[in-house]
């Protein structure tokens, strides 16, 4: 029974996380600005992760090193990537966004090598090459995107995985200042909320959540709550079953995101999309580090 327990949790976590991509697209269709959406996303994450922190008998650390950690992770893992996500997902199919997000470990590998945190290897270099091939398949005129003019948004969509990879490298290099992962992401969500509020006000993107919430608001609420809860589950699974086992969630998230996009948004894809997804997943498999090197960070 125990042998089947962790794979079942892994599968459920990946399937649930995959739903956040089409839900994010529905939220973006509301017409609200990206920072207005991010603000409410952070409010929900703070509530969920704060409750988990309190239930576990923990508290929010406020020493200088922790505050620095919260600030860096909030910028690298929430504000910038979510800003580019909402810009991109409003224009690109949600299924394509699910494939693009799989570029995180592909980008993290060369960053780690450049910083001397990892060694170059031909196996993982081949994985990086496969990942780049997958991106080219997506961006190729007439191959995947319904309108060739949308190709300009693929590089914008890749900014999110770039910043998630930078976040992962930062955490791998500097640690979490003695915080467990739920505490760390709770603090980062609070920092992100403090930063996001004045930005949304300055840009005129702040809005009041209607009561009762409408369909797009419920999509944002569901996406944000799912992320917070599933992140906590992911952290628990990594601590119990190992980081490499838990990192396999990424494969399920990508595949599930495409399937959820078909079910929820009725998106349909040409064969080139499935080829791009297979190539990207193959690249992820080759780039994936060994157990002792494994660092898997999924942004807010």
Image: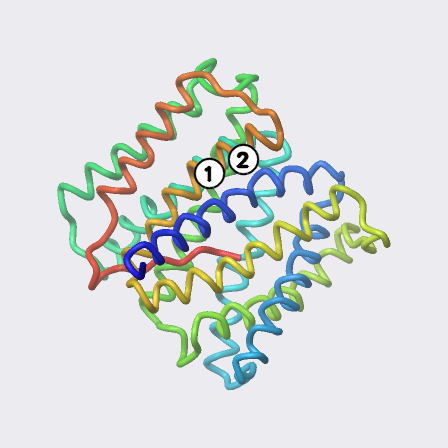
Name which quarter of the figure residue 116 lies in.
bottom left
State the residue at coordinates (48%, 64%).
232
Give the color scheme: rainbow, by chain, secondary structure or one colour.
rainbow
Q: Which mark is residue 260?
A: 2
Q: Position of residue 198 (x, y in %)?
A: 73, 63
Q: Which mark is residue 61?
A: none
- SS for dot 2: helix
Q: Position of residue 41 (x, y in %)?
A: 65, 56
Q: Position of residue 137 (x, y in %)?
A: 38, 23
In the image, residue 242 sits, relative to residue 95, either above or below, namely: below
Left or right: where does residue 157 sit relative to residue 225?
Answer: left
Q: Nearer the viewer, residue 168 or 155?
A: 168
- Residue at label 1? 256
State the residue at coordinates (68%, 63%).
43
In the image, residue 112 sits, relative to residue 269, either above or below, namely: below
- SS for dot 1: helix
- Measured Cα–Cα span from mark 2 to mark 1: 6 Å
In the image, residue 206 sits, relative to residue 128, either above or below, namely: below
Please say if the residues under marks 2 and 1 sit with CB atoms less than 8 Å apart: yes
Taking the view exactly as shown, the residue that stands out farthest to the top is 142
Left or right: where does residue 284 sit relative to residue 201?
Answer: left
């Amino acid at each position: 029974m125990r042998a089947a327990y962790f794979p079942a949790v892994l599968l459920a976590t990946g399937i649930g996380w995959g739903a956040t991509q089409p839900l994010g697209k529905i939220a973006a269709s509301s017409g609200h600005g990206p920072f207005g959406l991010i603000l409410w996303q952070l409010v929900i994450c703070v509530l969920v992760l704060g409750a988990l922190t309190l239930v576990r008998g923990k508290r929010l650390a406020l020493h200088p090193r922790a505050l620095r950690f919260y600030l860096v992770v909030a910028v690298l893992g929430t504000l910038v990537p979510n800003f580019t996500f909402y810009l991109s997902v409003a224009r690109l199919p949600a299924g394509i966004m699910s494939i693009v997000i799989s570029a995180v470990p592909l980008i993290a590998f060369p960053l780690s090598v450049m910083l001397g945190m990892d060694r170059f290897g031909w196996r993982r270099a081949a994985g990086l090459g496969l990942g780049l091939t997958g991106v080219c398949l997506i961006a190729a005129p007439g191959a995947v995107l319904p309108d060739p003019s949308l190709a300009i948004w693929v590089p914008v969509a890749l900014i999110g995985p770039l910043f998630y990879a930078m976040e992962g490298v930062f955490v791998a290099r500097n640690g979490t200042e003695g915080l467990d992962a739920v505490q760390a992401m709770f603090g980062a969500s609070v920092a992100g909320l403090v930063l996001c509020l004045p930005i949304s006000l300055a840009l005129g993107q702040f809005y009041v959540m209607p009561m009762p919430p409408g369909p797009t608001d419920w999509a944002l609420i569901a996406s944000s709550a799912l992320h917070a809860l599933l992140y906590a589950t992911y952290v628990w699974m990594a601590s119990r079953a190992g980081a490499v086992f838990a990192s396999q969630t990424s494969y399920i998230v990508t595949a599930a995101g495409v399937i959820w996009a078909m079910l929820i948004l009725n998106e349909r894809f040409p064969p080139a999309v499935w080829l791009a997804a297979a190539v990207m997943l193959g690249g992820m498999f080759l780039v994936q580090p060994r157990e002792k090197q494994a660092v898997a960070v999924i942004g807010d």
